[in-house]
Image (spheres, rainbow, N blue to C red):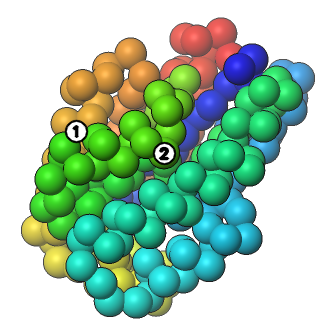
């Protein structure tokens, strides 16, 4: 694969969606052919599964299986073809979110998630993961002011603290891939951190 794969991660309310288009615009200005996508979602099938995951009650394993089913379709139909064509794929969430939410948040066994990751992705990992990190309390305040909550956003602060810890564990395991952004700062300061990350990689 000759393209680049960049993912944005963080707990709900971290503010990552605000910066995705700006990063994509910067990459396009530098000559990259950028494809923006998201998870859960990214294909017609995966978007239908997204609706179930966000709004239908289910246990942690069922939730993970649905997320990974959508991810499989997303990888095969969108991500791999785009990367093979030399495009830069910018995704709002990817597999790290499963380890953070279904693993950290829901308490699903990490070995189960690792097996699913292997079966579905066959080793596919982002070239860069921009992790928007901030305390659960601050994220909750932002969510309350922004939108009606889905079944994830309705979870308590303890859930999101576990999700944050799940992301921290993933970042510790892959420091060369993760770039931690202090998402508690003002928007301009967050943007400056992201630009510094991209510039450090020559992007």
Task: Confirm whether residue 133 shows in the render.
Answer: no
Q: Which numbered tag is attached to residue 116?
A: none
Characterize the local packing of mark 2: few (<14), some (14-19) or many (20 or more) Cα atoms within 10 angstroms.
some
Residue placed under numbered mark 1 in the picture: 168
Where is 196 relative to 164, above or below?
A: above
In the rendered image, the quadrant that contains the C terminus is top right
Instruction: Determine whether the residue tagged by mark 2 lies in a helix, strand or loop.
Output: helix
**Side (left or right) of 136 relative to 62:** left
Task: Decide which of 12, 52 is in the foreground and name it.
Answer: 52
Look at the picture and state if 20 lies above or below 29: below
Percent position of residue 171, x then y: 29, 31
- Of residue 16 and residue 33, the one placed in the foreground of this image is 33
Q: Are marks 1 and 2 in contact (CB under 8 Å)?
A: no
Q: Is residue 63 above or below residue 31?
A: below
| Residue located beneath label 2 in the image | 120
Q: Circle 1 — which element?
A: helix
Q: Disc 1 to disc 2, how far (Cα)?
A: 23 Å
Residue 122 seen: yes
Question: Which of these two is toward me, 87 or 131?
Answer: 87
At x 36%, y 48%, the residue is: 116
User: Which circle, 1 or 2, is nearer the viewer?
Assistant: 2
Q: Quadrant of residue 57 in the image?
A: bottom left
Q: How many marks?
A: 2
Residue 38: x, y in percent?
Answer: 61, 57
Question: Which x, y percent locates residue 159?
Answer: 16, 68
The answer to which image quadrant residue 107 occupies is: bottom left
Q: Residue at x 63, y 31 (%)?
A: 5
Mark 1: give few (<14), some (14-19) or many (20+) Cα within 10 Å: some
First in sequence: mark 1 or mark 2? Answer: 2
In the image, is 86 to the left or to the right of 119?
A: right
């Amino acid at each position: 694969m000759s393209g680049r794969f960049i993912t944005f991660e963080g707990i709900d309310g971290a503010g990552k969606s605000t910066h995705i288009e700006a990063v994509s615009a910067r990459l396009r200005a530098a000559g990259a052919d950028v494809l923006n996508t998201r998870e859960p979602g990214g294909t017609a099938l995966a978007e239908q599964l997204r609706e179930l995951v966000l709004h239908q009650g289910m246990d942690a394993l069922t939730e993970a299986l649905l997320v990974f089913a959508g991810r499989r379709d997303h990888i095969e139909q969108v991500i791999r073809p785009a990367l093979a064509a030399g495009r830069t794929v910018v995704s709002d969430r990817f597999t790290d979110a499963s380890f953070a939410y279904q693993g950290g948040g829901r308490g699903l066994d990490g070995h189960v998630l690792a097996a699913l990751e292997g079966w579905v992705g066959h080793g596919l990992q982002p070239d860069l993961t921009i992790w928007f990190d901030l305390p659960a309390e601050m994220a909750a305040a932002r969510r309350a002011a922004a939108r009606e909550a889905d079944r994830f956003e309705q979870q308590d602060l303890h859930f999101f603290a576990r999700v944050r810890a799940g992301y921290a564990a993933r970042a510790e395991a892959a420091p060369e891939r993760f770039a931690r952004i202090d998402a508690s700062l003002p928007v301009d300061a967050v943007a400056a951190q992201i630009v510094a990350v991209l510039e450090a990689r020559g992007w």
